[in-house]
Image (cartoon, rainbow, N blue to C red):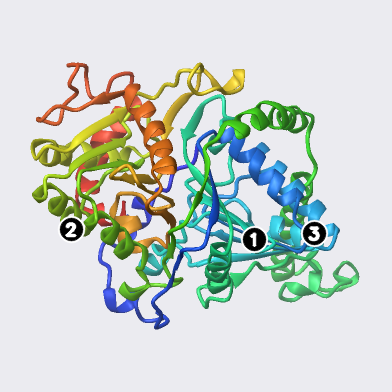
Amino acid sequence: MKTSTYLMAAVIAITSSTALASRNMKDSDGVYRRRTEPQQVTILDSGLASLKKRLDMIEGAKQSIEMEYFIYSIDTAGRLITDALVRKARQGVKVRVIVDTSLPIFELNKYYASVLKEAGIQVHYYNPAVLIRVVTAQFRSHRKTLIVDGVEGITGGRNIADEYFDLSPEYNFLDTDIVVKGSIVQDMRTSFEEFWNAKITEEAPLVRYPRPSDFPGLSDDYENSPWAHDKDARISISRFKGEVARYEEGTAKAKAFTVLTVEDHRIRRYVDTLGAQLLAKEATGVCHDMIFAADFPGMGEKTRVLRKQLALEASLAQKKVYIESPYFVVKKEISTILDDLLRRNVEINVMSNSLYSTDAFYTQAIFDTRIRRWTELGVNVWMHKGTIDPKVYPVIAEARPSRWGTHSKRAVIDEKTMIVGTFNMDPRSTNINAEMALICRDNPQLALAVQKNIQEHIASASKLNRSGFREDGRPMHENVPVSKKVLFWMTLPLASVLDFLL
């Protein structure tokens, strides 16, 4: 289970400076394109099907693969994806990967990047700011995309980790991706290039075997030096040997990551059988009015493009809106949008998490204390109960008893416009993180397919009443362990102050 504990950074320094945040901002409006020529679209609601599609796309690549992810984990899903990338790189396909370096979740370190480089894969890190640079370190790339040959692309809520593909026996995310094949993929690629070449993005550092001469007072034949037993030399020797041990351990782990285990092969068989069956059932269609909107890399107000487009789409709503987001923390920008919808008597339906179904207890602390304002105004809100029905949502046997939460970032407007992307309903996606989304307008077939899946999640969720409590009278924190409740209550005062970082 991965969680972005940004509050840890905020404790170090609570103040933030807009001037500092925008100091290195490049003057650009970001990437926005509207295409009216046909775009082939597939909606991926099954995690296993989504992993199958990614592997199929990678294995079918002829010229290039671009990947960009917030999380790239060292687990089964990560190894399956990496194995496919390495094989294509060795076949001569140009493979480039951007990974965000948010410290609480960053795993693809310099040892892995070096091994991937040897295999022909280029790795860049987005904003490798150290934690003590609190303001700068907050600006993350929350984007998720895979682009193959510039003709097929995928984005949505899923990162590269077991829990996003229904593979974890402990905790999994219900999520949504959108696959598009058509001219708009070139716009997605343009956005990738902006991030690849941005000043805030750096080439992953490569590691080499340490040499004694890298350390003060030592030569490469230090063992024969008359100074080898000097106090300062002994300190350098100790540091040298420690660095060698770290290099050997890190490199061994990184090399092992490129080799599939027996368990990986077993899971791959599930992906190729059940995953393929589920993929064949996913909703498909053709969109004749599609928008790709993406924030620009860097920091500052002018990098925020997507939220403006989402506000525009919401302003076009006439009857009803369905929203699914893992977090529902409403600040000024989102509040303005919701207030406008309510004034125009647009029905608002929100599907989000409960404390039990989420791993972000600090965000849920804000949700619980503020949701009443919206339920009193008439917003329909449901909280995920943390379970699934395998008859409705087929998964492998090991994942069925796990805890589940929603991670989808999607919306449907008036049963004809659908939005799928990486944007959460929270201040971080609104003001800090770089995000992206695909919007298909005037396509009831695809919009209703997404809405139907949201309604399936709603059917197994708890609706809140006007007072912001569960309509069925059950406790808000039902099934939550005592330890998690304690963390929830301890976090509440701090989360209320630092909600702009959530």
Q: In this view, does 469 lie above or below 431?
A: above
| Residue for badge 1 | 151
Closest to the observer: 423 or 167?
423
Q: Residues within 10 Å of mark 2 (few under 14, many from 20)?
A: few
Label count reads 3
Camera sees residue 75 = no
Helix, strand or loop at mark 2: helix
Numbered tag placed on residue 89 in the rendering: 3
Name the residue type under label 1.
Val
Task: Say few, some or many: other residues with alpha carbon within 10 Å of mark 3 (under 14 / 14 to 19 / 20 or more).
Answer: many
Quarter-of-image position of residue 386 = top left
Between tags 1 and 3, which lies in front? 1
Mark sitting earlier along the chain (2/3): 3
Q: In the image, residue 96 lies at what x, y percent?
A: 68, 64
The residues bearing labels 2 and 3 have C-alpha atoms spaced at a distance of 46 Å
Q: Can residue 312 be seen in this view?
A: yes
Q: How many angstroms separate mark 1 from mark 3 (CA)?
A: 18 Å
Q: Which residue is drawn at 35% across and 46% down?
A: 416
- Between residue 269 and residue 368, name the one nearer to us: 269
- Kindly report the distance in space between the C-alpha atoms of the residues bearing marks 1 and 2: 38 Å
Looking at the picture, how far across and down is residue 221, in whole percent?
Answer: 89, 71
In the rendered structure, which disc, 1 or 2, sits on the residue that comes first in sequence?
Answer: 1
Tag 3: amino acid: Ala
